[in-house]
Image (cartoon, helix red, strand yellow):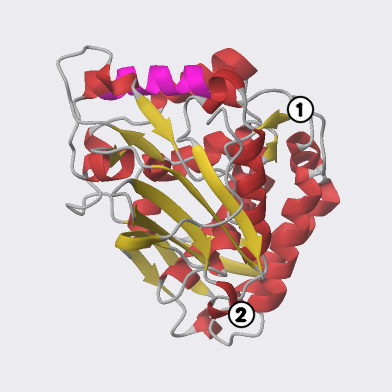
Amino acid sequence: MSATQPSKCPSHGTVVRTLRDGYWDRTELIRLNDGCLRVRKSSKGAQAPGPWSVHSLRREMQYLMALQGPAADYFPALLAAWDHAQRPGYEMAYIANTTDLGTIGCSAGMQQRQVDLFQDKLGQVMFNLIHEQVRPQYSLAQHISEVIDSVLRQLQQQNELAPLINAQSVWINGDRLAGTQAAMQRLVRDGHALRSIDQPPHVRLHGDFFLENILLGPQTVDPQWPGQLTLIDPVSVAGVFQGHPLFDLVKYESYATGELPALRSEKIELEGFNDPAQGRYIYRFCTEDPAIRPFRQIDWHSRLRSAYLSKYGLIDQAAYYLLEAYFAAVMTICTTGRQRPARLLKATLALNAALQD
């Protein structure tokens, strides 16, 4: 992080290109009057209202301003941050000639030995530097419960989705399971998975930890090249920035296994919503689709999981599945088209898996 305090105003400059057009915010490469380049992330304001929009971006700015020591070295320097008229935003240093690891993964742009080195370095950075133990500021379990409940109440207003949410039981992929709301209510009554999520350790999270939020420079002859990484865009879409370390692992593996790229590109098998009275649904992501196959050919997650186990011990699978359900439920509010019902089915499957574990 920069040794000087960031400016409290956006810089004067022109947009070179849009790097990411998000649901509530936009990330752009800008050129200042002196020719220097910066990356600017700013709220879309009233154009994109939502339950977490401004709140999450504010937390992201606070997160970056608070970073110190070795952990800060793995993020671009924060150069400006402002919060004017409900339109927060910030600017960070532009790191030229980098590619996000999501793009590299989708293009099969690294060999397995390089990916292994990358995961080893990533585990060191995340679990030894970013995951600094902190005093809890909120209950992550309560947040998860409240968000899933709120999401389901909103989705119940949609005729296509309500039957799956309200059913006591449905068939998914040939198995008889509880409907979405019934499964969540049983998990709340049981309480185990939620209690597990609030157990120590309580750490500073990345919060939006997946391959697209990790940058790597162009390949060099340096054997340590895969470990020369930069992290960007911390804090989850719903504003989570601290809690149980499992939160980051679940988010990372959702992408690294190919499931999240499949959902985003709608490379999914999805049935049952055209005739919900039957109560029979299918959800699978297309692992053999050419766009998804690279994540089956290269293992992007096993070594990172091993590093997690070495640091934190065995994983509570019920808590893992509940977090999967949470991520899927949150994103039903932030997506459209086939993604929304697909993510609701994913959430339903994950809630049931948490019950059965």
Tag 1 residue: 134
Please, what is the three-letter code of the amino acid marked with disc 2? Pro
- What is the secondary structure assignment of the residue under circle 2? helix
Circle nearer the viewer, 2 or 1: 1
Up the image or down, 116 lies above or below 189; here it is above
288 in the magenta segment: no
Image quadrant of residue 120? top left
Res. 173 mark? none
> Residue at horizontal 63%, vertical 38%?
65
116 in the magenta segment: yes
Tell whether 235 sits left or right of 143.
Answer: left
Up the image or down, 115 lies above or below 89; here it is above
Determine the residue located farthest toward the bottom in the rendered image. Answer: 159
Can residue 357 be spotted in the picture? Answer: no
Please, what is the three-letter code of the amino acid marked with disc 1? Val
> Residue at horizontal 70%, vertical 59%?
183
Classify mark 1: residues with Cα within 10 Å, few (<14), some (14-19) or many (20+). few
Residue 331 rendering spot, x and y as whole percentages: 54, 62
Residue 181 rendering spot, x and y as whole percentages: 71, 66
